[in-house]
Amino acid sequence: MLIDKNSPLPIYHQIEEYIKDRIEKGELKPGNVLPSEREYSQLFQVSRMTIRQAINKLVNDGYLYRKKGSGTFVAEKKFEQALQGLTSFTEDMKARGLTPSSKLLHFEIIPASPQVAATLQVAENTPVYEMKRIRLADEIPMALETCYISANLVKGLTEEIVSHSIYRYIEEKLQLEIGEATQIIESSLANETETELLKIKKGSPILLIERCTFLTNGTPFEIVRSSYRADRYKFISHLKR
Ligand code: GLP
């Protein structure tokens, strides 16, 4: 029996769990079309309204997505990103067995604005690197990052270096120790630039992450504003009491 009508669990919830289970077991794969509401209502012997309720919930939770005129499809699995460790994009992707890469859109040295100067604790107009990178995993755009880095601290950055891992350069070449970061996460909707560069639909959900990172001696060295695809990312934190 697929669902138990006598169970105290609402039927739509049981159906939701059934579909989730099929996705988790790989019987329904990303990109697969979901059986229609009619087929499911025959299978479970329940109303189409109940099926719709289950599907709506799975769409809201990011397991499924709808395409106008073509049906409901299984979404790509979201990356789970732990919020504890201070890791780089390159490390995160490699840990998942994916190949990280970057598309450098902009790279120049500019005088620090009052806001950037205050956060990086340098005098206004001190040289800072300003750069914009699309971060990709297995060639798929995941995030767009705009970064300001103290040029007097992180010396010798080049287009070649920032097209790979900045953290690795800082630690291995400059022998500076990256210590900690503060991070703010907000939700937003993709604007035109994000839509185009991340190859997503206008108005798709985005996670805006602002990170300020410090060396172990307490000196801030970078401010990064990132737009992550919220359809591909979820953040997990471990809470202890
Ligand atoms: C992540 C962080 C950024 C950081 C970057 C460094 O993407 N959100 O704040 O600048 O990692 O990554 P990499 O060393 O791959 O350049």
Image (spheres, helix red, strand yellow):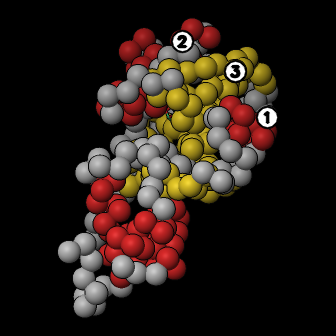
Which mark sits nearer the N-terminus, 1 or 3?
Answer: 3
Say which residue label 3 marks: 105
Whether the residues at callouts 1 and 2 have beta carbons within 8 Å, the answer is: no
**Residue type at the position of mark 3:** Leu
Residue at screen point 46% across, 16% down: 169
Residue 128 visible in this rendered orientation of the protein? no
Give me the C-alpha separation between circle 1 and circle 2: 24 Å
Quadrant of res 144: top right
**Residue type at the position of mark 2:** Ile
Give me the C-alpha separation between circle 1 and circle 3: 20 Å
Residue at screen point 51% across, 73% down: 52
Which mark sits nearer the N-terminus, 1 or 2?
Answer: 1
Give the tally of numbered discs. Answer: 3
Say which residue label 1 marks: 113
**Residue type at the position of mark 1:** Ser
Q: Position of residue 65 (x, y in %)?
A: 54, 54
Say which residue label 2 marks: 161
Q: Residues within 10 Å of mark 2 (few under 14, many from 20)?
A: few
Compare residues 148 and 201 and report the one nearer the observer.
201
Residue 125 visible in this rendered orientation of the protein? yes
Regarding mark 3 in the picture, which secondary structure is present there? Answer: strand
Which of discs 2 and 3 lies nearer the camera? The answer is: 3
Compare residues 88 and 34 and report the one nearer the observer.
34
Which of discs 1 and 3 lies nearer the camera? The answer is: 3
Regarding mark 2 in the picture, which secondary structure is present there? Answer: helix
Q: Position of residue 34 (x, y in %)?
A: 45, 55
Residue at screen point 61% across, 20% down: 103
